[in-house]
Image (tube, rainbow, N blue to C red):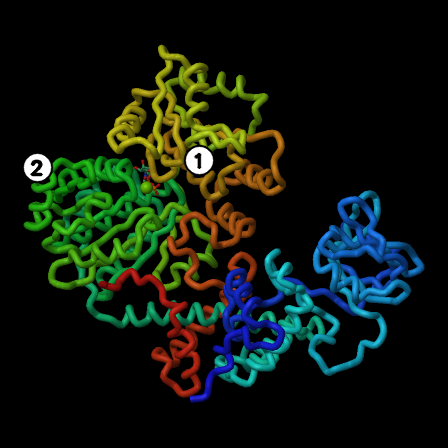
Amino acid sequence: MEKNPLHTDIQFLPGVGPKRAALFRNELDISTVGDLIKIYPFRYIDRSSIIPISSAAPDMAYIQIKARVTEINLIGAKGSIAPEDVRYNTVKRMSVLVSDGTGYMEMVFFKGIKWMHSKLKAGDEYIFFGKPSIFNGRLNMVHPEVDPAAGQQASGSMMENTMTGVYPSTEKLRNGGITGKVMSRLMENALKTALPAIEEILPLELLQEKGLVPIHFALRNIHFPKDTDSLEKARYRLKFEELFYLQLSLLKQKYVRSRNENGIMMPKIGDAFNICYSNLPFKLTGAQKRVITEIRNDMKSGHQMNRLLQGDVGSGKTMVAVLTALIAAGNGYQTCIMAPTEVLALQHFRNLTRYLQDTGVKPALLTGSSRTAERREIHQGLEDGSIGIIVGTHALFEDNVIFKKLGLVIIDEQHRFGVEQRARLWRKSAGGTVPHVLVMTATPIPRTLAMTLYGDLDVSVIDELPPGRQPVQTIAATESRRTAMFNFLKEQIRLGRQVFIVYPLIFESEKTDYKNLETGYEQIVTAFPFPPYKTAIVHGKQSNEEKKFNMDAFAAGRADILVATSVIEVGVDVPNASVMVIESAERFGLSQLHQLRGRVGRGSEKSYCILMTGNRLSKESRHRIELMCATENGFELAEEDMKMRGPGNLEGTRQSGLPVDLKIASLARDGLILNEARRCAQALLEKDPTLSQPSHRLLAEEISKDKYRMEDYSRIS
Ligand code: ADP
Ligand code: MG
């Protein structure tokens, strides 16, 4: 079989060799020609324009000047070195003064001096390309690219196009001689090698319908654009294709599952649901009702439910979870509710116990700290079916936990569980049936991200808060306001409210002056002495008992202040808490700040979130703090967060991060292309669900690649 040129090791490309190949591998994770051509420029420079030195300024991006060398100086530890004394290993710097008649500029080299020295001649004219900066009041360029101004002969190279791509690079690559220019030359070689082996994967019909340029055109022009129009077309095609493959693979998985008939049929609503429903002290919101209908339709469809329930903190997801579990119970099935922490599991259990009164369904709680006797009893109850709903933590994964008839798994704040752990739950279902799965997350995820991360799940959104909630007033303050802030807290405590104070770090880091929990705690107990003030503390280094003891004290109102690290971020519900103080708030991401703020404003009292920050904030931190003060809408904040930090860093994304490493499309910016790609993927699957038509053969091959393999919630492994 002939070797596929895409798999050629880049060390065999002219100008690479084993040393540079190793650099590429380590620095950019590139080992083959196929990898290399997928490194796209992140910027382009118009090489056709040469500017006069007199109009160059240090704040400009890359510029090109055409100038004559007037003076070359080699400088060692003791100053200038006379040309006759030069030993290159003692030269620290080479300074080259150039002029184009409008002004002078200094070109500075710290590395590769010997080579550059041999190349440059005083009196000759060159093209210098680089980033201008200012040093000692003088305009300069450090390590510009240099070409002789004359004698550049047309060679038919793609590199003669006027726009030149700028590729991602690292210091090690640059030191290894892989300059922008070298990179372009390599890319040209790589393309020549690779293009003949690259087939058009997208069906002709789709190319025509969407006006997409062919793949060869796209690759050539993304690296060496003929003009801006060609570049735009190339870019669109590559972004579209990237998102299209991803959506196609996700939708195909979803499609396969929806055709699979082994979902547990739960046709009834059941008495338990109705009893609980009529006992509710409030009316469900419209959004809650809509979501319950969506869930109910899944459960009676005969297909397995795989649904993501998104809803802002306090939107009433727990209520939905309880009612869903009661539908399962009404059909004779057990439910398992997985919580990420003991605190949360306990809280769920308490709520459950309240809601399940009169329903005849028995709840239980199983966590790491359940005692042996209790544990044995619960195992028994699960096995004989007397326990209808079990809430728990990782303890539920243990092998001796067996269900009589597990029909529903509800995973709260799912991102804290690994795939393997979830798969173990499935195995507990007797009779080999696959339980319905409801994943709940309180972390709003931007729509584009949800479509990508959870494209294989159905998504329900609770986009409405229960009535009567007062908005949380958010205030930013600096250290100078601390006394006033403390007085405000005292006032709130006097009114019978409780206060959270959250710190970003546990131990003082010498490098930062961020408030940390321990010194913070001391400051708080000094400012709020006992009696009358009672302060509890919770952090990640405590044992579970300690944590629980302190949380309980706060939840039960025995403490006025809870000092904590962000462990309280997830789900904790203390309606009487009316103030959330976040220390060093600039240290937190937007989603995290939003989660923390969601801990207050759960009762009927007016609530406050106070963001304490340092005096000097980066532009980005300031922006975050301002946004927090401006909106309480979690989805809006999540969109902004994604724009600022990129999708990979968002809270609430799958543990493994993005399923595919996107090379060119951006979930933050290419929402419209994503919609289009998804729509086209959907349409294609409707026509050819198994991708078995001949014109879809390459597509089917593409999306069967490993990189598209998603964690599958329904997979029993
Ligand atoms: P989430 O889990 O989405 O953060 P919860 O389910 O914990 O929200 O609900 C927050 C609070 O709102 C709880 O105290 C709950 O009893 C209450 N609640 C839920 N649904 C409603 C509703 N429809 N009307 C009034 N209060 C509600
Ligand atoms: Mg909750």
Residue at far top of view? 531
Across and down, in percent, residue 275 comes to: 17, 43
Label placed on residue 597: 1
Splitting the image into 4 quarters, where does residue 261 fall?
bottom left
Residue 112 as seen in the image, left or right of residue 322? right
Amino acid at dot 2 = Ala
Q: Is mark 1 within 8 Å of ligand 1?
A: no
Figure quadrant of residue 436: bottom left
Q: Is residue 318 visible?
A: yes
SS category of the residue bearing label 2 = helix
Residue 365 placement (x, y as % from top left): 18, 40
Q: In terms of sequence position, does the residue under pointer 2 or pointer 1 come before the other?
A: 2
Q: Amino acid at mark 1?
A: Arg
Residue 205 visible: no
The image shows residue 44 at horizontal and vertical percentages of 69, 65
* x 44%, y 33%: residue: 505
Q: Nearer the viewer, residue 562 or 578?
A: 562
**Towards the viewer: 230 or 472:** 230
Label 1 crowd (10 A; few <14 / some 14-19 / many >=20): many
Which image quadrant: the C terminus? bottom left
The circle drawn on residue 3 is none
